């Protein structure tokens, strides 16, 4: 199995070689996606060391509000996805029309889950009340670096100190918890850098590592966010929730009906920064079948890992999303995965690994996860995986 060195994956070549044959597969009805990432902007005010934002070559810009309205209208007419988000890359709360966009999604009855770095709660203080009163179903705050030391990894604007950042997030969470008619569930995300046998290290980085350190951070933030809350859950119960936490995997720790702590392992984001990769040849991925993305310029991509738009499936400026998802490029990708074949170069890199053994483990693991574990868990717990 050849190593896939970085120079072989230069953007222009990658774009050419990863284009999917237009006539390879007959069109088929589009799947019902679980999640559609609508990138309202790919501009960000942070430069997090763990994020591919710094190496992204795509032109920066905001989505035209008229294009966003057109997309949301289509989604409202026929069910295409269970959930929409307003990011793929970028920071949605710096999109100039973000509150108009949230209102448009709400008016159309769409399940919008907003993921944000939470910086504007401090930088634009009116965002706290505007977001609380927006009625949005779910907000995920990527706190990620929960202490002043690890906050230095964020490349935040100089005027935003770690403590000011934490204060802004705290104010939003507390206001939301105390606003009885706000339906918003808030998730606070922590980055878990505990080494994991399946995952390829993105780059050497320590944020929160191991059980003891993560539990200490979770305890600190739980007591900070819930301080003086009139309907605060029992302290022993909170302790028990946190005691159950296991490091190195995605986990949810519910503390209150409107507050969940979430830990997420550091991911290599499709191995984009690895020097060399043993490429995948077999495996399964839910790209273009359960998830998809629309970049700010309207390009449709199969997943959030394709942050450069190297696997363009079409453009919503030219065709409705439904048509794009049922046309040949998307069908071809899905049909390949259905045969457990990984044909696209970007996917081969994404599902590969830094060593031969890990690559085989990841490929076999992807099939076991999507085809055995996931369906089994869904049968045992119908809400499993739905956050
Ligand atoms: C690309 S960001 C875009 C939205 C927004 N800017 C934010 O930070 O929440 C989406 C999510 O990916 C997470 N993320 C970025 N790089 C990551 C990595 N290498 N491993 C795991 N999560 C990562 C972010 O922290 C955030 O929760
Ligand atoms: S993780 Fe979010 S906040 Fe950080 S650089 Fe990436 S897009 Fe920006
Ligand atoms: S394997 Fe391909 S479709 Fe799946 S996440 Fe990776 S790049 Fe996206």
Image (spheres, rainbow, N blue to C red):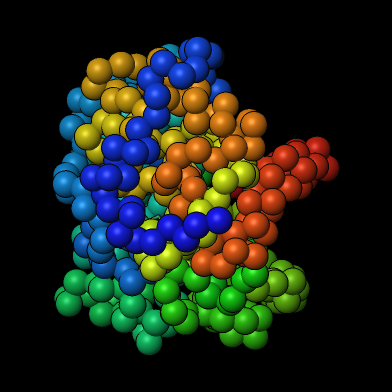
* Residue ID at (39%, 61%): 5
Q: Nearer the viewer, residue 166 or 31?
A: 31
Give the left or right position of residue 24, taking residue 96 as reference: right
Residue that appears at 28% across and 25% down: 315
Is residue 319 in sight in this rendering?
yes
Kindly indicate the quadrant of the structure image that contains residue 226.
bottom right
Q: Is residue 156 left or right of residue 360?
A: left
Tell me which image quadrant ligand 1 sits in. Answer: bottom left
Instruction: Say if 120 sits above or below 39 in the image.
Output: below
| Percent coordinates x, y for residue 58 in the rendering | 21, 48
Name the quadrant containing residue 294.
Answer: top left
Q: Position of residue 131 (x, y in %)?
A: 35, 49
Q: Judge from the rendering whether residue 18 lies leftward or rightward of residue 217; answer left or right.
A: left
Identify the residue at image location x=40%, y=24%: 21
Q: In the rendered image, is residue 103 in sight?
A: no
Across the whole image, how many numbered discs are drawn on residues?
0
Furthest residue in direction front, as rendered: 2
Residue 130 is situated, as x and y percent measured from the top left of the image, at: 30, 48
343 or 370, nearer to the observer: 343
Task: Tell me: 342 left or right of 147.
Answer: right
Q: Quadrant of the N terminus?
A: bottom right
Residue at position x 65%, y 85% in the image:
212
Residue 326 pos. (x, y %): 47, 17
* Depth check, front residue: 16 or 85: 16
* Along the viewing direction, whichever of 218 and 71 lies nearer the viewer: 71
As drawn, the residue found furthest toward the right would be 380
């Amino acid at each position: 199995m050849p190593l896939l060195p970085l120079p072989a994956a230069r953007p222009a070549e990658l774009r050419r070689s990863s284009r999917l044959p237009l006539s390879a597969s007959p069109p088929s009805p589009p799947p019902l996606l679980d999640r559609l990432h609508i990138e309202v902007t790919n501009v960000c005010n942070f430069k997090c060391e763990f994020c591919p934002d710094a190496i992204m070559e795509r032109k920066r810009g905001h989505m035209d509000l008229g294009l966003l309205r057109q997309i949301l209208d289509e989604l409202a007419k026929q069910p295409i996805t269970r959930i929409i988000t307003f990011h793929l890359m970028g920071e949605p709360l710096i999109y100039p029309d973000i509150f108009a966009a949230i209102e448009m999604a709400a008016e159309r009855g769409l399940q919008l889950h907003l993921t944000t770095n939470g910086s504007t709660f401090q930088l634009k203080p009116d965002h706290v009340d505007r977001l609380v009163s927006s009625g949005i179903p779910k907000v995920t705050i990527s706190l990620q670096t929960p202490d002043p030391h690890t906050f230095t990894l964020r490349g935040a604007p100089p005027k935003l100190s770690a403590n000011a950042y934490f204060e802004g997030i705290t104010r939003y969470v507390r206001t939301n918890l105390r606003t009885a008619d706000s339906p918003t569930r808030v998730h606070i995300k922590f980055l878990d850098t505990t080494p994991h046998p399946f995952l390829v290290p993105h780059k050497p980085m320590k944020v929160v590592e191991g059980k003891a350190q993560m539990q200490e951070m979770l305890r600190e933030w739980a007591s900070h966010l819930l301080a003086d809350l009139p309907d605060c859950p029992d302290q022993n119960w909170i302790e028990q929730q946190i005691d159950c936490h296991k490091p190195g995997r995605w986990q949810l720790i519910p503390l209150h009906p409107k507050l969940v702590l979430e830990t997420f392992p550091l991911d290599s984001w499709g191995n984009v920064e690895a020097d060399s990769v043993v490429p995948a040849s077999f495996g399964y991925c839910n790209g273009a079948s359960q998830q998809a993305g629309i970049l700010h310029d309207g390009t449709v991509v199969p997943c959030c890992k394709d942050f450069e738009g190297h696997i363009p499936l079409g453009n919503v400026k030219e065709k409705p999303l439904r048509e794009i998802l049922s046309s040949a490029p998307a069908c071809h990708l899905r049909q390949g995965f259905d045969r457990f074949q990984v044909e696209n170069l970007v996917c081969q890199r994404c599902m590969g690994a830094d060593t031969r053994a890990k690559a085989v483990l990841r490929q076999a693991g992807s099939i076991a996860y999507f085809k055995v574990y996931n369906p089994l868990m869904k049968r045992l717990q119908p809400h499993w995986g739905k956050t």
